[in-house]
Amino acid sequence: MTIRFENQSQWDNSVITSIEIKAPKEKVYKVVYQENPRPKLCPKIKNSTVVFDDGIVQEFYFDIAKDDGSMRRIRTISRCDGDIIEFFQPTPPQYLQGYFVKWIFEEVSMNCCKIIAENLWKMNEYTHTKFPADDKMSTEEKLRQHIILYSNSALEAIQEKAVASI
């Protein structure tokens, strides 16, 4: 099974965020992939269940609290390939046609790791409903800011968990 997206042109938008974590790369990687800490990585995630894990491909579901207080179950498939973990959601949020994330783990030093998070997405006809343009910001920029916030909060939670595990 391959979930790589070699053709970057299929995505409307992308944004890259990153963080340096004062912990060995192996510890940081373990926090993300091997310990299944997803409820701890985002305050909106309330539950996470791994249904398949062969050490390379992992399929999991998580329940996320929506803005209105209801819950949404999200299916995610990830693939681990060396220092890269790729994620995609077969059924993305209603306001996206597709969403894909690639986390690249780089060793900065023996006790420091950098995670580069590349987020790619394709909008659909509902994007403008969820993120309506106004005088200050376009729909595209509102969605971009939303994804940056989500990506940064996940990276910060990984940092917190990785540093605590040392």
Image (cartoon, rainbow, N blue to C red):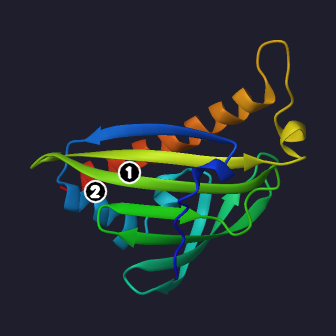
Q: Residue at x 55, y 47 (%)?
A: 119
Disc nearer the start of the sequence (2/1)? 2
| 153 or 164, nearer to the observer | 153
- Residue at horizontal 29 percent and vertical 66 percent from the top: 30
Residue drawn at 87 percent across, 37 percent down: 128
The image position of residue 117, as x and y in percent, is 45, 46
Between 88 and 150, the one nearer to me in the picture: 88
Amino acid of disc 2: Val
In the rendered view, would you say 4 is above or below 49?
above
Q: Using the image, tell me which numbered label, if any, was put on residue 158.
A: 1
Of 30 and 82, the residue lying toward us: 82
In the figure, is residue 54 to the left or right of 88? left
Amino acid on which disc 1 is placed: Ile
Asked if labels 1 and 2 touch by Cβ distance under 8 angstroms, the answer is yes
- SS for callout 1: helix
* Residue positioned most to the top: 135
Q: Would you place residue 19 above or below residue 90 in this image?
A: above
Residue picked out by circle 2: 28
Q: Residue 73, how many percent across, how many down?
A: 72, 68
Q: Decide if residue 23 is on the left or right side of residue 122.
A: left
Residue 38 located left or right of residue 65: left
Above-or-below relation of 128 to 106: above
Residue 112 seen in this snapshot: yes
Residue 35 in view (yes/no): no
- In the rendering, at what x and y percent does residue 8 appear? 58, 51
